[in-house]
Structures are given as C-alpha cells and as structure tokens.
Image (cartoon, grey):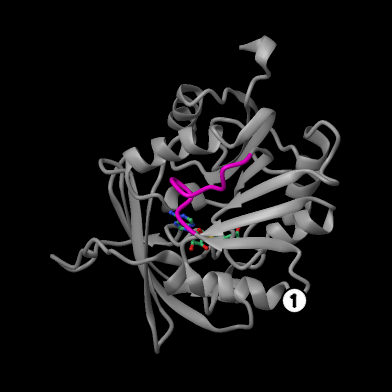
Amino acid sequence: MSHIKGNHAPWRGHVRAWSTGDVLEPIDANYGETFADVYDAWYGAVSDVGALTALIDTLLVGGLSGAEVIECGVGTGRVALSLAAAGALVTGIDNSESMLERLRANDPEGAVTAFLGDMSSDLPTREFAVAVVAFNTLFNLQTEDQQRRFFHHVASRLRPGGLLFIEANEFRQIERVEVESEQLRPGGSTVQSRSQIDPTSQTASGEFDDGSTVRQWRIRYLSTTQIDEMATEAGLPLVQRTEDAIGTPFTELSERHVSVFRRPILEEQ
Ligand SMILES: C[S@@+](CC[C@H](N)C(=O)[O-])C[C@H]1O[C@@H](n2cnc3c(N)ncnc32)[C@H](O)[C@@H]1O
C-alpha cells in the first residue's frame, strides 16, 4: 500500500501507469453535490481554520469583529462558522444546494448568511472588508476565463483596503502523472483513489471509490505566479504569502500557500 500524506491531496500516492486507455473521462460534475454527504467527515480538518481566522483578524485593520466578510464556496461552513464566531458578519455563497443544506444543519443559529450562486458572477452587490477562498476552492472554477472573471468580480466587491485570502496547493508537477492509492478516511474507512495531473491543461482529476459510491472530481489549478498575475490584473496586488496560516515561510519547496491580496485605497491608486 502506498503512503499517503494527506487526505486532501489524492494525487499523493504511488505513481503507477493505469492500463492502456484507462484514463478518466472529463467530468461535468458539481463538486458540492458530489461530496456534500462526506465533506465534513473527510475534509473537516483539511486546513487550520483557527489559524486562518487569527491571521485574518490580525491583518484586517480593526480586526474581524463587526467586519463584513464574504466566503466564496462556503460549503458546509467549516471556515465561515469560525469567522462568525470571531465576530465577523459572514455571508457565504456556494453553487451547491446540498452543501448549503449541510451548512444550515451546522449553523442552527443562522450565524452565516448563505445563498446559492456562482462565485465568479453572483456575489452580492455591496462592499466587503474581506473575501475568503479557502482550500483549493479557487480551482473549482474550471476554465481560465472563469478564474479571471472571478478575480475581477471579487475585486469589485472589496472595499478600498479590503483583503482577499486564498488558500491553495502549489502544484509543481511538470510531467503528466497518474496515481493510484488507498486512502484512509477519518473513522478508519478506506477509499480507493485514482487521479491524474495533466500539466498541459493544468488539471488534476480523479475519483474516490468507497465501495458503494464513486465520487469524481476535477480542478483547474493555477501556480502562484498565475494567481498573482490574475489578481494584479484585477487590481488586487499581493500583500503577503506564507506556506500556511501560522506564518511558515513560503519557499520554492512549499506545496501549499496562504496568499493575501489587497484592494488599494484611493490615494494609493
Ligand atoms: C473544497 S470545497 C470548500 C468548502 C469550504 N470553503 C471549506 O473550506 O471547507 C469547495 C466549495 O466550493 C463550492 N463551489 C464550487 N464551484 C463553485 C462556484 N463556481 N461558485 C460557488 N461555489 C462553488 C463547492 O460546492 C464547495 O462547497
């Protein structure tokens, strides 16, 4: 069996050629609809939410208390509920009704205002102090065009001085790989994972088979250089980048990052 570093990175298994022609077909699945029933169990600890909340609280002038925050791809509320607990006024958008149903169950007090929509086109028409795109959610946008539109859209919803936080993996793959592995899930169950990374299309895709359900996924990843270029083009220069939310320096070996972008205030423009 292969050694797996983290459940959130299915592409980390042993590299193995699949049988000829055994390549995953492109999928047209809605991530949230596919994963809502297992999301909290599988990915509840995918990144350090407490540290991210503390980082946002530190970097935002005036702190999180009373600040208007939008989480893009809010999912089941893993991050949003922590931000709300820190006193932020949190709005969440997600394009999966099943994810939002889970959020409502996790948030009986209604601390997070959530609605169904596409984060690249449907953000509420008012200004936020902070926008958050948590772990790899940016890569759920499946085309370069949609990703570019997202940056322009979110920039238009940040107040001057407002901050955009992005958490994502840095893919350093230069050759196409196919990976097969058995992954342990919290609670002790296992899933069979097959995935592939195609650097030409900048996609990683795959499927998890838990014996009764096969769940397919696909992301279009971006390098930090590409993210910075898209953000800058949208008027959101990079302010800082670390490997994680507790401040580990980001280096050429880092496989993940927490990046912070800021909408300049008028006199800086
Ligand atoms: C990886 S999950 C992250 C959920 C949550 N932010 C967290 O960190 O636990 C990605 C979420 O983004 C949502 N999503 C994917 N594409 C979206 C889009 N175009 N607009 C809004 N939400 C989207 C999915 O339904 C899913 O809930």
Residue occupying image coordinates x 51% and y 51%: 136
Say which quadrant the N terminus sits in.
bottom left
Position of residue 19 relative to residue 156, above or below, is: below
Give the left or right position of residue 104, taking residue 220 as reference: right
| Quarter assignment of residue 223 | top left
The residue type indicated by label 1 comes to: Pro
Residue 256 at x, y percent in the picture? 57, 43
Q: Main secondary structure of the magenta part?
A: loop
Disc 1 designates what residue? 108
Range of magenta residues:
117-126
Specify whether residue 22 is painted magenta.
Answer: no
* 10 Å crowding of disc 1: few (<14), some (14-19), many (20+): few
| Quarter assignment of residue 222 | top left
Give the left or right position of residue 13, taking residue 79 as reference: left
Residue occupying image coordinates x 63% and y 46%: 132
Residue 233 at x, y percent in the picture? 45, 23
Residue occupying image coordinates x 64% and y 82%: 187
Position of residue 188 relative to residue 167, above or below, is: below
Residue 67 at x, y percent in the picture? 78, 43
Say whether residue 260 is visible: no
Q: Nearer the viewer, residue 48 or 131?
A: 131
Give the left or right position of residue 190, taking residue 198 as reference: right
Say which quadrant the C terminus sits in.
top right
Element at label 1: loop
